[in-house]
Amino acid sequence: MDHGETLEFVLDNSADIIMLVSDDGTAEYMTPSVERVLGWPPELFRTRSAFEMIHPEDLERVKGAFQGTFEPGVALRPDRFRVARAQGGWAWLECRVSYARSRDDVVVVTARDVTDEVQAAESATLHEEKRRRAEAQLAHNTLHDPLTGLPNRHLLADRIDQAIRRAHRTGSRAAVLFCDLDRFKVVNDALGHGVGDQLLVVVARRLRSCLRETDTVARFGGDEFVVLTEDLASDDDAAALAGRIRDVLDDPIHVGGHALHVSVSTGVVTIDGDLARDEILSNADAAMYSAKEAGRSGWVIFDAELRQRASDRLRIEADLRHSLATGAGLTVHLQPEVELATRATVGFEALVRWTLPDGSNVPPDRFLPIAGDAGLMPMLGRHVVAGVAQGLRELRTAGHGSWIALNAAAEELQHPDFAPQVRRALDAVEIDASRLCIEITEHSILKDPAGVDLALRPLRDLGATVAIDDFGTGYSSLSYLTRFRPEYLKIDRTFTSAVLERSGDRAVVEAVLHLADSLSIVTVAEGIETEEQAAALDELGCQLGQGWHFGRPAPMAQILGA
Protein backbone atom coordinates (compact mmCIF):
# COMPACT_ATOMS: atom_id res chain seq x y z
CA MET A 1 0.00 0.00 0.00
CA ASP A 2 1.61 3.25 -1.16
CA HIS A 3 1.46 6.56 0.71
CA GLY A 4 -1.68 7.75 -1.10
CA GLU A 5 -3.55 4.56 -0.38
CA THR A 6 -2.47 4.66 3.25
CA LEU A 7 -3.74 8.21 3.68
CA GLU A 8 -7.04 7.33 2.01
CA PHE A 9 -7.43 4.31 4.30
CA VAL A 10 -6.79 6.42 7.41
CA LEU A 11 -9.27 9.12 6.38
CA ASP A 12 -11.97 6.63 5.46
CA ASN A 13 -11.71 4.94 8.85
CA SER A 14 -11.23 8.00 11.03
CA ALA A 15 -13.73 8.34 13.91
CA ASP A 16 -13.49 12.11 13.64
CA ILE A 17 -15.01 14.16 10.86
CA ILE A 18 -12.37 15.91 8.73
CA MET A 19 -13.36 18.33 6.02
CA LEU A 20 -12.22 21.16 3.80
CA VAL A 21 -14.77 23.95 4.16
CA SER A 22 -15.16 27.14 2.19
CA ASP A 23 -16.36 30.40 3.68
CA ASP A 24 -19.99 29.71 2.67
CA GLY A 25 -20.04 26.46 4.64
CA THR A 26 -19.95 24.05 1.70
CA ALA A 27 -17.37 21.26 1.87
CA GLU A 28 -14.97 20.43 -0.90
CA TYR A 29 -14.08 17.23 0.94
CA MET A 30 -15.54 15.41 3.91
CA THR A 31 -14.61 12.05 5.43
CA PRO A 32 -17.16 9.22 5.39
CA SER A 33 -17.34 9.41 9.20
CA VAL A 34 -19.84 12.25 8.85
CA GLU A 35 -22.44 9.70 7.83
CA ARG A 36 -21.58 7.45 10.76
CA VAL A 37 -21.82 10.34 13.23
CA LEU A 38 -24.64 12.45 11.79
CA GLY A 39 -26.32 10.23 9.22
CA TRP A 40 -25.70 12.70 6.38
CA PRO A 41 -23.90 11.51 3.21
CA PRO A 42 -20.59 13.39 2.61
CA GLU A 43 -21.56 14.55 -0.86
CA LEU A 44 -24.54 16.47 0.57
CA PHE A 45 -22.22 19.17 1.85
CA ARG A 46 -20.71 19.91 -1.54
CA THR A 47 -23.86 21.84 -2.42
CA ARG A 48 -25.41 22.48 0.99
CA SER A 49 -23.84 24.68 3.64
CA ALA A 50 -22.91 23.01 6.90
CA PHE A 51 -24.14 26.13 8.67
CA GLU A 52 -27.70 24.99 7.91
CA MET A 53 -27.15 22.02 10.21
CA ILE A 54 -26.00 24.05 13.22
CA HIS A 55 -28.45 24.69 16.08
CA PRO A 56 -29.99 28.19 15.87
CA GLU A 57 -28.77 29.07 19.35
CA ASP A 58 -25.16 28.27 18.39
CA LEU A 59 -25.13 29.48 14.77
CA GLU A 60 -24.13 33.15 15.12
CA ARG A 61 -21.35 32.34 17.56
CA VAL A 62 -19.92 29.61 15.34
CA LYS A 63 -20.15 31.65 12.11
CA GLY A 64 -18.48 34.65 13.71
CA ALA A 65 -15.56 32.57 14.94
CA PHE A 66 -15.33 30.62 11.68
CA GLN A 67 -14.97 33.65 9.41
CA GLY A 68 -11.74 34.74 11.07
CA THR A 69 -9.86 31.51 10.33
CA PHE A 70 -9.18 32.22 6.67
CA GLU A 71 -6.14 34.26 7.64
CA PRO A 72 -2.68 32.63 7.93
CA GLY A 73 -1.77 31.66 11.49
CA VAL A 74 -5.34 31.95 12.76
CA ALA A 75 -6.96 28.89 14.28
CA LEU A 76 -10.35 28.43 15.95
CA ARG A 77 -9.82 27.10 19.42
CA PRO A 78 -11.86 24.00 20.23
CA ASP A 79 -15.54 24.89 20.43
CA ARG A 80 -18.60 22.80 21.14
CA PHE A 81 -21.93 23.25 19.42
CA ARG A 82 -24.96 21.29 18.33
CA VAL A 83 -25.46 19.88 14.83
CA ALA A 84 -28.62 18.28 13.41
CA ARG A 85 -28.72 14.52 12.89
CA ALA A 86 -30.33 13.11 9.73
CA GLN A 87 -32.65 10.95 11.84
CA GLY A 88 -33.61 13.83 14.11
CA GLY A 89 -32.24 15.30 17.27
CA TRP A 90 -28.90 16.95 17.87
CA ALA A 91 -25.32 15.79 18.22
CA TRP A 92 -22.67 17.73 20.07
CA LEU A 93 -19.45 18.23 18.11
CA GLU A 94 -16.16 19.62 19.32
CA CYS A 95 -14.49 21.35 16.36
CA ARG A 96 -11.05 22.67 15.61
CA VAL A 97 -10.51 24.92 12.57
CA SER A 98 -7.06 25.60 11.17
CA TYR A 99 -5.67 27.49 8.19
CA ALA A 100 -4.96 25.37 5.09
CA ARG A 101 -1.43 26.02 3.86
CA SER A 102 -1.20 26.86 0.15
CA ARG A 103 -5.00 27.36 0.02
CA ASP A 104 -6.76 30.55 0.97
CA ASP A 105 -10.27 29.50 -0.10
CA VAL A 106 -10.79 26.66 2.40
CA VAL A 107 -9.97 25.80 6.00
CA VAL A 108 -9.43 22.41 7.63
CA VAL A 109 -12.16 21.46 10.09
CA THR A 110 -11.77 18.54 12.49
CA ALA A 111 -14.87 17.57 14.46
CA ARG A 112 -15.20 15.02 17.27
CA ASP A 113 -18.52 13.61 18.52
CA VAL A 114 -18.77 14.58 22.21
CA THR A 115 -22.50 13.97 22.66
CA ASP A 116 -22.01 11.32 25.34
CA GLU A 117 -19.59 13.56 27.24
CA VAL A 118 -21.94 16.53 27.16
CA GLN A 119 -24.94 14.45 28.22
CA ALA A 120 -22.94 12.88 31.02
CA ALA A 121 -21.84 16.34 32.17
CA GLU A 122 -25.42 17.64 31.94
CA SER A 123 -26.67 14.64 33.89
CA ALA A 124 -24.03 15.20 36.56
CA THR A 125 -24.92 18.89 36.69
CA LEU A 126 -28.62 18.08 36.96
CA HIS A 127 -27.93 15.53 39.68
CA GLU A 128 -25.83 18.06 41.59
CA GLU A 129 -28.54 20.68 41.22
CA LYS A 130 -31.17 18.24 42.49
CA ARG A 131 -28.89 17.34 45.38
CA ARG A 132 -28.40 21.01 46.28
CA ARG A 133 -32.13 21.63 46.04
CA ALA A 134 -32.85 18.59 48.22
CA GLU A 135 -30.29 19.73 50.78
CA ALA A 136 -31.74 23.24 50.73
CA GLN A 137 -35.27 21.84 51.17
CA LEU A 138 -34.10 19.60 54.01
CA ALA A 139 -32.42 22.57 55.68
CA HIS A 140 -35.59 24.61 55.21
CA ASN A 141 -37.79 21.81 56.60
CA THR A 142 -35.50 21.46 59.60
CA LEU A 143 -36.02 25.11 60.46
CA HIS A 144 -39.64 25.69 59.38
CA ASP A 145 -43.07 24.45 60.42
CA PRO A 146 -44.51 22.16 57.71
CA LEU A 147 -48.10 23.36 58.22
CA THR A 148 -47.73 27.15 58.21
CA GLY A 149 -44.31 27.55 56.59
CA LEU A 150 -43.27 29.77 59.51
CA PRO A 151 -39.90 29.40 61.26
CA ASN A 152 -40.04 26.72 63.93
CA ARG A 153 -38.70 26.88 67.46
CA HIS A 154 -35.16 25.91 66.34
CA LEU A 155 -34.83 28.84 63.94
CA LEU A 156 -36.55 31.10 66.46
CA ALA A 157 -34.03 30.08 69.11
CA ASP A 158 -31.13 31.06 66.86
CA ARG A 159 -32.67 34.45 66.05
CA ILE A 160 -33.43 35.19 69.69
CA ASP A 161 -29.83 34.33 70.59
CA GLN A 162 -28.62 36.75 67.91
CA ALA A 163 -30.95 39.46 69.23
CA ILE A 164 -29.64 38.92 72.77
CA ARG A 165 -26.03 39.26 71.61
CA ARG A 166 -26.89 42.36 69.58
CA ALA A 167 -28.72 43.95 72.52
CA HIS A 168 -25.80 43.18 74.83
CA ARG A 169 -23.29 44.59 72.34
CA THR A 170 -25.09 47.69 71.07
CA GLY A 171 -27.84 48.39 73.62
CA SER A 172 -30.54 48.00 70.94
CA ARG A 173 -34.12 47.28 71.99
CA ALA A 174 -35.93 44.05 71.11
CA ALA A 175 -38.91 42.12 72.43
CA VAL A 176 -40.46 38.66 72.37
CA LEU A 177 -44.24 38.28 72.20
CA PHE A 178 -45.64 34.88 73.18
CA CYS A 179 -49.08 34.47 71.56
CA ASP A 180 -51.55 31.71 72.37
CA LEU A 181 -54.92 31.33 70.64
CA ASP A 182 -57.83 31.40 73.08
CA ARG A 183 -60.07 28.30 73.22
CA PHE A 184 -58.44 26.72 70.18
CA LYS A 185 -59.13 23.26 71.63
CA VAL A 186 -62.85 23.92 71.31
CA VAL A 187 -62.41 24.38 67.54
CA ASN A 188 -60.41 21.16 67.23
CA ASP A 189 -62.86 19.15 69.32
CA ALA A 190 -66.02 20.53 67.71
CA LEU A 191 -64.95 20.82 64.05
CA GLY A 192 -61.99 18.45 63.76
CA HIS A 193 -58.24 18.85 63.41
CA GLY A 194 -58.52 19.52 59.68
CA VAL A 195 -60.44 22.74 60.28
CA GLY A 196 -58.10 23.52 63.17
CA ASP A 197 -55.09 23.23 60.86
CA GLN A 198 -56.71 25.48 58.25
CA LEU A 199 -57.38 28.02 61.00
CA LEU A 200 -53.72 27.98 62.06
CA VAL A 201 -52.60 28.60 58.48
CA VAL A 202 -54.82 31.68 58.19
CA VAL A 203 -53.73 32.94 61.62
CA ALA A 204 -50.08 32.59 60.55
CA ARG A 205 -50.80 34.59 57.38
CA ARG A 206 -52.50 37.37 59.35
CA LEU A 207 -49.69 37.54 61.88
CA ARG A 208 -47.14 37.97 59.08
CA SER A 209 -49.26 40.74 57.58
CA CYS A 210 -48.89 43.01 60.62
CA LEU A 211 -45.12 42.60 61.02
CA ARG A 212 -42.13 44.26 59.43
CA GLU A 213 -39.83 42.37 57.05
CA THR A 214 -37.17 42.31 59.77
CA ASP A 215 -39.49 40.77 62.39
CA THR A 216 -39.79 37.02 62.94
CA VAL A 217 -42.99 35.13 63.66
CA ALA A 218 -42.55 31.44 64.48
CA ARG A 219 -44.93 28.64 65.25
CA PHE A 220 -43.76 27.52 68.65
CA GLY A 221 -46.06 24.50 68.87
CA GLY A 222 -49.76 23.67 68.74
CA ASP A 223 -51.65 26.97 68.82
CA GLU A 224 -48.69 28.97 70.13
CA PHE A 225 -46.86 31.58 68.06
CA VAL A 226 -43.83 33.65 69.07
CA VAL A 227 -42.91 37.00 67.54
CA LEU A 228 -39.40 38.48 67.74
CA THR A 229 -39.24 42.19 66.95
CA GLU A 230 -36.00 44.21 66.99
CA ASP A 231 -34.75 47.78 66.63
CA LEU A 232 -37.56 49.24 68.75
CA ALA A 233 -37.59 52.95 69.47
CA SER A 234 -39.08 52.31 72.92
CA ASP A 235 -40.69 49.56 74.97
CA ASP A 236 -44.08 51.00 74.01
CA ASP A 237 -43.49 49.72 70.46
CA ALA A 238 -43.79 46.14 71.72
CA ALA A 239 -47.14 46.89 73.36
CA ALA A 240 -48.30 48.59 70.15
CA LEU A 241 -47.37 45.45 68.20
CA ALA A 242 -49.35 43.30 70.68
CA GLY A 243 -52.33 45.55 69.96
CA ARG A 244 -51.92 45.13 66.19
CA ILE A 245 -51.75 41.36 66.62
CA ARG A 246 -55.02 41.42 68.55
CA ASP A 247 -56.66 43.71 65.98
CA VAL A 248 -55.54 41.70 62.94
CA LEU A 249 -57.51 38.72 64.27
CA ASP A 250 -60.70 40.70 64.88
CA ASP A 251 -62.36 39.80 61.59
CA PRO A 252 -63.86 36.27 61.44
CA ILE A 253 -61.82 33.57 59.73
CA HIS A 254 -63.75 31.52 57.18
CA VAL A 255 -62.57 27.90 56.98
CA GLY A 256 -64.40 24.67 56.25
CA GLY A 257 -67.70 26.48 55.78
CA HIS A 258 -67.46 28.04 59.26
CA ALA A 259 -66.96 31.66 60.30
CA LEU A 260 -64.64 31.41 63.30
CA HIS A 261 -63.92 34.26 65.70
CA VAL A 262 -60.43 34.00 67.09
CA SER A 263 -58.72 35.92 69.88
CA VAL A 264 -55.19 35.70 71.19
CA SER A 265 -53.57 36.21 74.59
CA THR A 266 -50.05 37.62 74.44
CA GLY A 267 -47.17 37.87 76.88
CA VAL A 268 -44.51 40.49 76.16
CA VAL A 269 -40.88 40.43 77.33
CA THR A 270 -38.21 42.98 76.40
CA ILE A 271 -34.70 41.79 75.54
CA ASP A 272 -31.95 43.70 77.34
CA GLY A 273 -29.04 41.34 76.70
CA ASP A 274 -28.87 40.06 80.26
CA LEU A 275 -31.38 37.18 80.23
CA ALA A 276 -30.82 33.87 78.46
CA ARG A 277 -33.21 32.72 75.75
CA ASP A 278 -34.96 30.04 77.83
CA GLU A 279 -35.64 32.55 80.61
CA ILE A 280 -37.00 35.07 78.12
CA LEU A 281 -39.40 32.50 76.66
CA SER A 282 -40.40 31.28 80.12
CA ASN A 283 -41.15 34.85 81.22
CA ALA A 284 -43.13 35.53 78.05
CA ASP A 285 -45.10 32.34 78.63
CA ALA A 286 -45.86 33.43 82.20
CA ALA A 287 -47.03 36.84 80.98
CA MET A 288 -49.24 35.14 78.39
CA TYR A 289 -50.93 33.01 81.09
CA SER A 290 -51.45 36.17 83.11
CA ALA A 291 -53.19 37.69 80.07
CA LYS A 292 -55.48 34.65 79.90
CA GLU A 293 -56.26 34.92 83.60
CA ALA A 294 -57.14 38.59 83.07
CA GLY A 295 -59.87 37.65 80.59
CA ARG A 296 -58.10 36.68 77.35
CA SER A 297 -57.86 38.69 74.12
CA GLY A 298 -55.24 41.01 75.54
CA TRP A 299 -51.59 41.28 76.45
CA VAL A 300 -49.48 41.56 79.59
CA ILE A 301 -45.95 42.95 79.79
CA PHE A 302 -43.68 40.91 82.02
CA ASP A 303 -42.46 42.78 85.11
CA ALA A 304 -40.86 42.13 88.47
CA GLU A 305 -44.16 41.03 90.05
CA LEU A 306 -44.77 38.54 87.28
CA ARG A 307 -41.17 37.39 87.59
CA GLN A 308 -41.82 36.54 91.24
CA ARG A 309 -45.09 34.80 90.37
CA ALA A 310 -43.34 32.81 87.64
CA SER A 311 -40.60 31.84 90.07
CA ASP A 312 -43.20 30.77 92.64
CA ARG A 313 -45.03 28.82 89.98
CA LEU A 314 -41.89 26.91 88.98
CA ARG A 315 -41.08 26.23 92.63
CA ILE A 316 -44.60 24.93 93.32
CA GLU A 317 -44.48 22.72 90.24
CA ALA A 318 -41.11 21.26 91.29
CA ASP A 319 -42.30 20.65 94.87
CA LEU A 320 -45.52 19.09 93.62
CA ARG A 321 -43.63 16.73 91.34
CA HIS A 322 -41.52 15.67 94.33
CA SER A 323 -44.59 15.11 96.49
CA LEU A 324 -46.27 13.06 93.76
CA ALA A 325 -43.15 10.94 93.36
CA THR A 326 -42.78 10.30 97.10
CA GLY A 327 -46.39 10.59 98.26
CA ALA A 328 -45.30 12.97 101.01
CA GLY A 329 -47.59 15.82 101.99
CA LEU A 330 -50.59 14.86 99.86
CA THR A 331 -53.71 13.78 101.72
CA VAL A 332 -57.37 13.27 100.89
CA HIS A 333 -59.82 15.18 103.07
CA LEU A 334 -63.57 14.62 103.13
CA GLN A 335 -66.34 17.20 103.42
CA PRO A 336 -69.78 15.91 104.44
CA GLU A 337 -72.91 16.18 102.30
CA VAL A 338 -76.08 16.01 104.39
CA GLU A 339 -79.83 15.58 103.94
CA LEU A 340 -81.28 19.02 104.58
CA ALA A 341 -84.49 17.54 105.99
CA THR A 342 -82.80 15.29 108.58
CA ARG A 343 -79.23 16.69 108.70
CA ALA A 344 -77.95 13.13 108.38
CA THR A 345 -74.65 12.69 106.56
CA VAL A 346 -75.20 10.63 103.39
CA GLY A 347 -71.97 11.23 101.52
CA PHE A 348 -68.70 13.07 101.29
CA GLU A 349 -66.78 15.00 98.69
CA ALA A 350 -63.10 14.07 98.44
CA LEU A 351 -60.75 17.06 98.33
CA VAL A 352 -56.99 16.81 97.95
CA ARG A 353 -54.82 18.80 100.35
CA TRP A 354 -51.09 19.48 100.16
CA THR A 355 -48.83 20.24 103.09
CA LEU A 356 -45.19 21.28 102.56
CA PRO A 357 -42.35 19.89 104.69
CA ASP A 358 -42.30 23.12 106.73
CA GLY A 359 -45.92 22.51 107.73
CA SER A 360 -47.46 25.21 105.55
CA ASN A 361 -50.47 24.38 103.40
CA VAL A 362 -50.70 25.23 99.69
CA PRO A 363 -54.29 26.21 98.81
CA PRO A 364 -55.93 23.96 96.19
CA ASP A 365 -56.75 26.93 93.97
CA ARG A 366 -53.00 27.61 93.87
CA PHE A 367 -51.56 24.19 93.06
CA LEU A 368 -54.40 22.55 91.08
CA PRO A 369 -54.17 24.97 88.09
CA ILE A 370 -50.40 24.46 88.06
CA ALA A 371 -50.89 20.69 88.10
CA GLY A 372 -53.26 21.00 85.14
CA ASP A 373 -50.88 23.19 83.12
CA ALA A 374 -47.93 20.93 83.91
CA GLY A 375 -49.78 17.75 82.91
CA LEU A 376 -49.69 16.40 86.47
CA MET A 377 -53.42 15.83 86.90
CA PRO A 378 -53.30 12.11 85.98
CA MET A 379 -50.56 11.53 88.59
CA LEU A 380 -52.45 13.56 91.18
CA GLY A 381 -55.65 11.75 90.22
CA ARG A 382 -54.08 8.35 90.91
CA HIS A 383 -53.18 9.51 94.40
CA VAL A 384 -56.71 10.79 95.05
CA VAL A 385 -58.38 7.66 93.62
CA ALA A 386 -56.31 5.49 95.95
CA GLY A 387 -57.24 7.75 98.88
CA VAL A 388 -60.93 7.62 98.01
CA ALA A 389 -60.89 3.81 97.76
CA GLN A 390 -59.14 3.62 101.13
CA GLY A 391 -61.69 6.06 102.58
CA LEU A 392 -64.62 3.96 101.35
CA ARG A 393 -63.12 0.89 102.99
CA GLU A 394 -62.66 2.71 106.31
CA LEU A 395 -66.22 4.04 106.16
CA ARG A 396 -67.54 0.55 105.54
CA THR A 397 -65.45 -0.86 108.38
CA ALA A 398 -66.85 1.81 110.70
CA GLY A 399 -70.38 0.94 109.62
CA HIS A 400 -71.03 4.04 107.50
CA GLY A 401 -72.97 3.48 104.29
CA SER A 402 -71.96 6.85 102.84
CA TRP A 403 -70.68 7.41 99.33
CA ILE A 404 -67.71 9.54 98.31
CA ALA A 405 -67.67 11.94 95.38
CA LEU A 406 -64.43 12.02 93.42
CA ASN A 407 -63.66 15.20 91.47
CA ALA A 408 -62.29 14.47 88.00
CA ALA A 409 -60.89 17.10 85.64
CA ALA A 410 -61.62 16.62 81.94
CA GLU A 411 -58.04 15.69 81.02
CA GLU A 412 -57.89 13.27 83.95
CA LEU A 413 -61.27 11.69 83.18
CA GLN A 414 -60.35 11.14 79.53
CA HIS A 415 -56.99 9.53 80.30
CA PRO A 416 -57.12 5.96 78.91
CA ASP A 417 -56.14 4.47 82.25
CA PHE A 418 -58.55 6.43 84.45
CA ALA A 419 -61.50 4.02 84.42
CA PRO A 420 -59.29 0.89 84.73
CA GLN A 421 -57.41 2.64 87.54
CA VAL A 422 -60.67 3.30 89.42
CA ARG A 423 -61.74 -0.30 88.94
CA ARG A 424 -58.38 -1.63 90.22
CA ALA A 425 -58.46 0.65 93.27
CA LEU A 426 -62.00 -0.43 94.22
CA ASP A 427 -61.24 -4.10 93.59
CA ALA A 428 -58.20 -3.88 95.85
CA VAL A 429 -60.40 -2.86 98.81
CA GLU A 430 -63.41 -4.92 97.70
CA ILE A 431 -65.74 -1.92 97.47
CA ASP A 432 -68.74 -1.76 95.16
CA ALA A 433 -68.55 1.12 92.67
CA SER A 434 -72.11 2.17 93.50
CA ARG A 435 -70.64 3.97 96.52
CA LEU A 436 -68.48 6.11 94.24
CA CYS A 437 -69.72 9.28 92.57
CA ILE A 438 -67.73 10.88 89.73
CA GLU A 439 -68.02 14.65 90.01
CA ILE A 440 -67.36 16.82 86.94
CA THR A 441 -67.76 20.57 86.47
CA GLU A 442 -69.72 22.26 83.73
CA HIS A 443 -66.48 23.85 82.53
CA SER A 444 -64.88 20.41 82.16
CA ILE A 445 -67.82 19.30 80.04
CA LEU A 446 -67.58 22.44 77.94
CA LYS A 447 -63.99 21.62 76.95
CA ASP A 448 -65.01 18.36 75.28
CA PRO A 449 -68.63 17.19 75.73
CA ALA A 450 -68.28 14.17 73.44
CA GLY A 451 -65.01 13.08 75.05
CA VAL A 452 -66.41 13.41 78.57
CA ASP A 453 -69.51 11.45 77.59
CA LEU A 454 -67.37 8.65 76.17
CA ALA A 455 -65.07 8.61 79.22
CA LEU A 456 -68.00 8.31 81.65
CA ARG A 457 -69.46 5.19 80.05
CA PRO A 458 -67.03 2.60 81.50
CA LEU A 459 -67.38 4.25 84.92
CA ARG A 460 -71.17 4.00 84.73
CA ASP A 461 -70.76 0.38 83.63
CA LEU A 462 -68.88 -0.23 86.88
CA GLY A 463 -71.87 1.18 88.79
CA ALA A 464 -70.54 4.65 89.66
CA THR A 465 -72.92 7.60 89.77
CA VAL A 466 -72.31 11.05 88.24
CA ALA A 467 -72.66 14.56 89.63
CA ILE A 468 -72.39 17.83 87.72
CA ASP A 469 -70.62 20.39 89.87
CA ASP A 470 -70.81 24.22 89.82
CA PHE A 471 -74.13 24.06 87.97
CA GLY A 472 -75.24 27.41 86.60
CA THR A 473 -71.77 28.84 85.97
CA GLY A 474 -71.22 27.27 82.54
CA TYR A 475 -73.06 27.16 79.23
CA SER A 476 -75.76 24.99 77.69
CA SER A 477 -76.62 23.62 81.13
CA LEU A 478 -79.97 22.18 80.07
CA SER A 479 -78.50 20.21 77.21
CA TYR A 480 -75.94 18.72 79.60
CA LEU A 481 -78.66 17.49 81.92
CA THR A 482 -80.50 15.64 79.17
CA ARG A 483 -77.29 14.32 77.59
CA PHE A 484 -75.41 13.14 80.69
CA ARG A 485 -78.38 12.29 82.94
CA PRO A 486 -76.47 12.83 86.21
CA GLU A 487 -77.75 11.37 89.46
CA TYR A 488 -76.71 14.54 91.33
CA LEU A 489 -76.76 18.22 90.47
CA LYS A 490 -74.65 20.55 92.62
CA ILE A 491 -75.88 24.16 92.65
CA ASP A 492 -72.96 26.57 92.69
CA ARG A 493 -72.28 28.52 95.89
CA THR A 494 -72.68 31.85 94.08
CA PHE A 495 -76.44 31.19 94.03
CA THR A 496 -76.92 29.41 97.35
CA SER A 497 -74.95 31.93 99.41
CA ALA A 498 -77.26 34.75 98.28
CA VAL A 499 -80.54 32.86 98.31
CA LEU A 500 -81.76 34.93 101.28
CA GLU A 501 -80.55 38.30 100.01
CA ARG A 502 -81.19 38.50 96.28
CA SER A 503 -84.52 37.58 94.78
CA GLY A 504 -82.85 36.93 91.42
CA ASP A 505 -80.58 34.23 92.86
CA ARG A 506 -83.50 32.70 94.74
CA ALA A 507 -85.47 32.53 91.49
CA VAL A 508 -82.53 30.79 89.76
CA VAL A 509 -82.28 28.22 92.55
CA GLU A 510 -86.05 27.56 92.44
CA ALA A 511 -85.89 27.05 88.66
CA VAL A 512 -82.96 24.63 88.96
CA LEU A 513 -84.67 22.66 91.71
CA HIS A 514 -87.87 22.39 89.68
CA LEU A 515 -85.95 21.27 86.59
CA ALA A 516 -83.92 18.69 88.53
CA ASP A 517 -87.05 17.33 90.19
CA SER A 518 -88.73 16.86 86.81
CA LEU A 519 -85.70 14.84 85.67
CA SER A 520 -85.45 12.86 88.96
CA ILE A 521 -82.03 14.34 89.73
CA VAL A 522 -80.96 14.81 93.36
CA THR A 523 -79.91 18.40 94.08
CA VAL A 524 -76.99 19.43 96.30
CA ALA A 525 -76.59 23.04 97.44
CA GLU A 526 -72.91 23.98 97.82
CA GLY A 527 -71.41 26.65 100.04
CA ILE A 528 -73.99 26.64 102.86
CA GLU A 529 -72.51 28.63 105.72
CA THR A 530 -75.51 29.43 107.97
CA GLU A 531 -78.53 27.67 109.41
CA GLU A 532 -80.77 30.26 107.74
CA GLN A 533 -79.42 29.33 104.30
CA ALA A 534 -79.88 25.62 105.06
CA ALA A 535 -83.47 26.13 106.20
CA ALA A 536 -84.33 28.27 103.19
CA LEU A 537 -82.92 25.73 100.74
CA ASP A 538 -84.73 22.90 102.51
CA GLU A 539 -87.94 24.86 102.24
CA LEU A 540 -87.36 25.35 98.50
CA GLY A 541 -87.06 21.59 98.06
CA CYS A 542 -83.31 21.05 97.80
CA GLN A 543 -82.50 17.55 99.07
CA LEU A 544 -78.82 17.75 100.05
CA GLY A 545 -76.48 20.44 101.32
CA GLN A 546 -72.75 20.94 101.69
CA GLY A 547 -70.68 23.69 103.25
CA TRP A 548 -68.83 24.87 106.33
CA HIS A 549 -72.11 24.98 108.28
CA PHE A 550 -72.12 21.17 108.23
CA GLY A 551 -68.39 20.60 108.40
CA ARG A 552 -65.12 21.62 106.88
CA PRO A 553 -62.96 19.19 104.88
CA ALA A 554 -61.13 16.93 107.32
CA PRO A 555 -58.93 13.81 107.28
CA MET A 556 -60.63 10.43 107.56
CA ALA A 557 -59.43 9.89 111.14
CA GLN A 558 -61.17 13.11 112.20
CA ILE A 559 -64.34 12.18 110.28
CA LEU A 560 -64.55 8.79 111.98
CA GLY A 561 -63.77 10.23 115.38
CA ALA A 562 -66.50 12.87 115.17
Image (cartoon, rainbow, N blue to C red):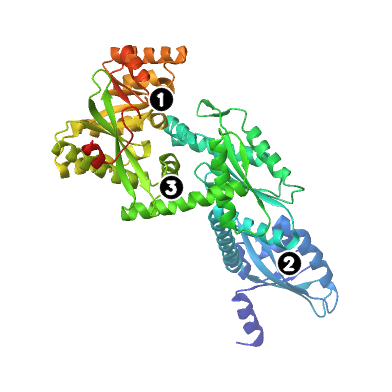
Specify few, some or many for label 1: CA neighbours under 10 Å numbering under 14, 14-19, or 20 or more: many
Viewer-side label of 2, 3: 3
Q: Quadrant of residue 112?
A: bottom right
- Count of marks overlaid on the render: 3
Residue identifier under label 2: 27
Question: Is the residue under label 3 in contact with that under label 2 (CB below 8 Å)?
Answer: no
- Comes first in the chain, label 2 or label 1: 2
Query: Residue 27 location in percent, x, y?
Result: 73, 67
Secondary structure under tag 3 reads: loop
Viewer-side label of 1, 3: 1
Depth order, front residue of 380/263: 380
| Residue type of the residue flagged with mark 1 | Arg
State the CA–CA distance, disc 2 to disc 1: 109 Å
Residue identifier under label 1: 493
Q: Residue at x 75, y 47 (%)?
A: 234
- Comes first in the chain, label 1 or label 3: 3
Residue 287: mark? none
> In the image as oriented, which residue stretches furthest toward the right?
71
Depth order, front residue of 387/53: 387
Specify few, some or many for label 2: CA neighbours under 10 Å numbering under 14, 14-19, or 20 or more: many
Secondary structure under tag 2 reads: strand
Q: Quadrant of residue 341?
A: top left
Residue identifier under label 3: 374
Q: Is residue 206 left or right of residue 475?
A: right
Secondary structure under tag 1 reads: helix
| Residue type of the residue flagged with mark 2 | Ala
Quick check: can you spot residue 343? yes
- Comes first in the chain, label 2 or label 3: 2
Depth order, front residue of 505/488: 505
